Structure formats: C-alpha cells, structure tokens
Image (cartoon, helix red, strand yellow):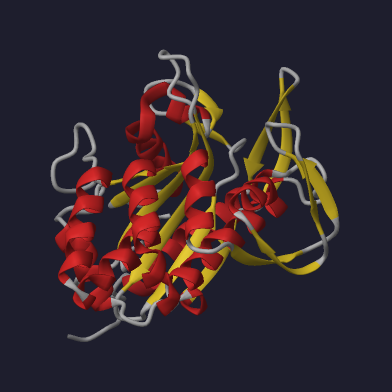
Amino acid sequence: MLFLILIFISLVSFSGYLLFQTYAVAKDSYEELEGREEKSVLREEPVYISTDPVSVLLLGIENYTDENDHGRSDTIMVATFNPDKQTMKLVSIPRDTLVNIPGYKEDKINHSYSIGGKEKVIETVEEFLDIPIDYYATVNFKGFTNIVDAVGGVTVDVPFDFNDINRNWERFYFHEGTQKLSGEEALVYARMRKQDPRGDFGRNDRQRQIVTGVIDRLSSPKTLLKIDDIASEIGGNIETNMRVKEALAFRKKYPNFNSSSIEQLELKGYDNYINNIYYFGVDPDNLEEVTTELKNHLELSTTSEEETPSEDIEY
C-alpha cells in the first residue's frame, strides 16, 4: 500500500490542486516510529531513498475494538529497493511463523503487533531477517477495500476455482484464470487460506498479486480522474514514516517503476505443532538464502570467503 502514496505523490506536477491534495494526504498519513530517530539500529549511518538501497515493511492490519489489543498484522511483507538496479524484491512472512519476539518470547510473528504495535513488528522482523527496516507502511482492511475500489478494482490470475465468505456472510466466487476484483472481493481473495492446498504459501502469493495489481492500476493515467477518492482513502487508512520529500525523491529515482520491476521471494519450511498449537517453522537454509539475497540487494556487507583477502595476494 505504500505505493499508493508514492505514485499519488508523483502526480503533483500536473497542477497546484494535486500539490495541495498531496501534502494533505502526506500530513494525514505520516506517523513516525516511537524510540527511533533517524535510522534503524542495524544501520551505521542514515540512508536516503534518493541515493541508497532501502527496505520497507508493509503491514496489513486487522483492528479490534479492545483498547488493550492493538490487533493483528495478518499480512507482513518486506520490500527492498535498489536504485542502481531499479528493482524491488518482495518477500512475504507467513503470519504463523515461529520467531523470537524481542523482550517477550518465541511466538507467532503476527502476535508481535498486538504486543507492541508496529515498532515491535519492526524489531522482530529485523532480528528474524537480519536486515534493517528503514520505512514502514500500514493499511487496515477497511481501508484496503476502499482503496481498491477507488482505483477501479484490481486484476488477478486466480490459480483455481473456489468460493468464500466475508464477515457479513456474503459469498464470493472466484474462477481459475484472469478475473477483475472489487475491493471486497480482493479482500476475500487475499485472506482465504483453508481451501488453498498450499496453505499460507498460496495465501501469500495471492496477497502479492493484489499488491502488484494495485501498483499497475496506479500507474495508469486514468488514476487522475479518481484523485479525490484516492486521496481521501489514503489519508484516512494508511500510516507511514516516509516524509513528502522522501516520497518525491523515490518517484524521481524510480520513474518507470511497475510490477515488472518486482522479484518475489518465498520463505520455505514445515508445519510445527507445539502444545497442539500450529506454527510455521522456516527452513534454516532457506532463511539464510533469502536473508543473503535481501542483504545483497540492499548492498549490505556479508561475510564470505570471497570478501576475505587471501594471504597469497600480493599488494
């Protein structure tokens, strides 16, 4: 959902009205991270989106009415951007993944949001993937459906026939092949898991389809005709710590960014039951591969034999 803000902000050059709308949206959406100043604890120096590879944590939040419960981050994705390669890598973290939640205990990763909000999720993801999280963006599920409707729906490639219901017990049908979805249909499509033979993996694939589909919709010039609706939904339903000047720098650095620039990564593992509670256990070798790929994309130093000077080399 961060791309809704980024691409929306790129439209400011068309008129003063859009410029006004942009700053209004950015003001409503901006929310800094508590306890963090200018960089992640895993960064030696601050990074700048106009010149450096950066990472973004994307969270889909289900809010609850209990004031003592922040809710659940049922969708957790990490995106990394490399300005030289003009590419993005996107990995989904299954919500049932067993991780260490710093200052708490081992538990499902989606519980980290209810324990300490977005700050605790970031801390948990940084420890799990061993990479810094530079930016975050959250969207609640109500806002998700409204935003998809505001951009005119999203087109996906349905992997198999299935049907499912929403919270109002309304049933929606999905047929294998290309299908255009409304906001409510997109939410049901993205959240279904029990009927998917791949479980959370299939669910994560469908969620990434939605994200890339929204990116392509917002890249269309027709988006200009819906600028008021999009502005209203973004401002009221998205939070991010990216400032206006940083978002402008992003669009300048990635002028032709679209879904073809995205490489999707996948965490692999096994089913794990502890005290009759289901957890997803990540395969250590696969986790190392994904972590290394993200670090390389962020151009972070990694320890390897190739980087260690040989004693036989003459200087």
Please provide percent x and percent y for residue 278: 71, 29
Nearer to us in this view, 7 or 153: 153
Q: Is residue 293 visible?
A: yes
Please name the residue shown 41% across and 78% down the image.
Answer: 221
Quadrant assignment, res 114:
top left
Report the residue at 58% width, 52% height from top: 183
Viewer-proximal residue, 48 or 26? 26
Q: Quadrant of the C terminus?
A: bottom left
Q: Is residue 47 visible?
A: no
Task: Tell me if residue 8 comes above or below residue 256 in the rendering.
Answer: above
Picture layout, residue 150 above or below residue 105: below
Farthest-out residue, right: 161
Left or right: 86, with 11 as reference point: right
Q: Left or right: where does residue 191 sit relative to residue 87?
A: right
Q: Is residue 265 left or right of residue 122?
A: right
Extreme residue toward the bottom, this view: 314
Q: Within the image, what quadrant is residue 313 found in?
A: bottom left
